[in-house]
Amino acid sequence: MRFAALAALSIHDVKNRLALMAARAENRGDNETLRDALAAAGELTRLLACYKAETGLLRPDIDAFSPADLVKELVTETRPLSQLDILGDSQLAPQSWFYDESLIRMVLANALHNALRFARQRILVTARESGDWLELCVADDGPGYPPEMLANPARPAPMSEEGVGIGLYLARHVAALHENHGFRGEVSLDNAPGAVFCLKLPR
């Protein structure tokens, strides 16, 4: 068995163990351990997805979903992990949009967990229709992205202790998998002044 395939199997096993750890932490009200376990499991999920992307195995399963429901679910799942004020706004969201729900959820969940580390008081998750695009954004009131990330938005992000490189690389790959009429999804980063991560998907 090739090392990459063995590593993929090991990732699945560790993810299952982390899921059990998260369940035990939730049952005893240990939010800090719950947050760490979910973050670690998410990082492994993204690592496995990167492996699939590199080997051409990551293919989108696109169907119609509700962006408003996605925002609501992400906010509901994230609130117990922090004392921060975590809000959702989907008033301008379309009733439905076509995308791979599991991949998009994974990308936004990663953006949310990054925001949890840097936000001071508030995180806002939004979904809105802008012309022929669906914009799904996560904004926080933290220090914002470093200048080097904003200066070269198309350049692969360097790896860091927080795993930001994997998350951003995967987000851009997932966005590009959503293509329609010659338009591909894209990711944008901005400071306003806190960090604003935005995933844009074509109609």
Image: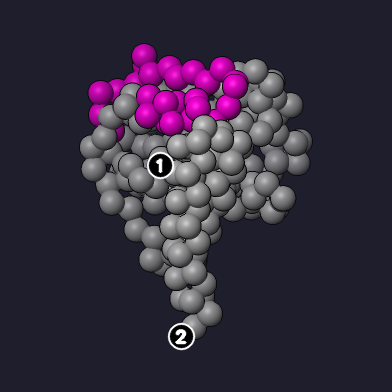
Write down the region rendered in magenta.
Answer: 71-97
User: Is 157 positioned to the left or the right of 59 in the image?
Assistant: right
Check disc 1 and give the amino acid type: Ile
- If you read the primary sequence from the N terminus, does the residue marked by circle 1 or circle 2 appear first? 2
The residues bearing labels 1 and 2 have C-alpha atoms spaced at a distance of: 31 Å
Element marked by disc 1: helix
User: Is 188 positioned to the left or the right of 15 in the image?
Assistant: right
Whether residue 91 appears in magenta in the rendering, the answer is yes
For the residue pair 198 and 45, the one nearer the viewer reads as 45
Q: Residue at x 39, y 60 (%)?
A: 58
User: What number is the disc on residue 1?
Assistant: 2
- Residue 92, given in percent of the width and then of the height, sits at 36, 16
Q: Few, some or many C-alpha atoms within 10 Å of disc 1 (few <14, some 14-19, many ≥20)?
A: some
Figure check: 77 above or below 175 = above
Q: Residue at x 76, y 36 (%)?
A: 147
Determine which quarter of the picture holds residue 150.
top right
- Residue 23, given in percent of the width and then of the height, sits at 44, 44
- Residue under pointer 1: 104
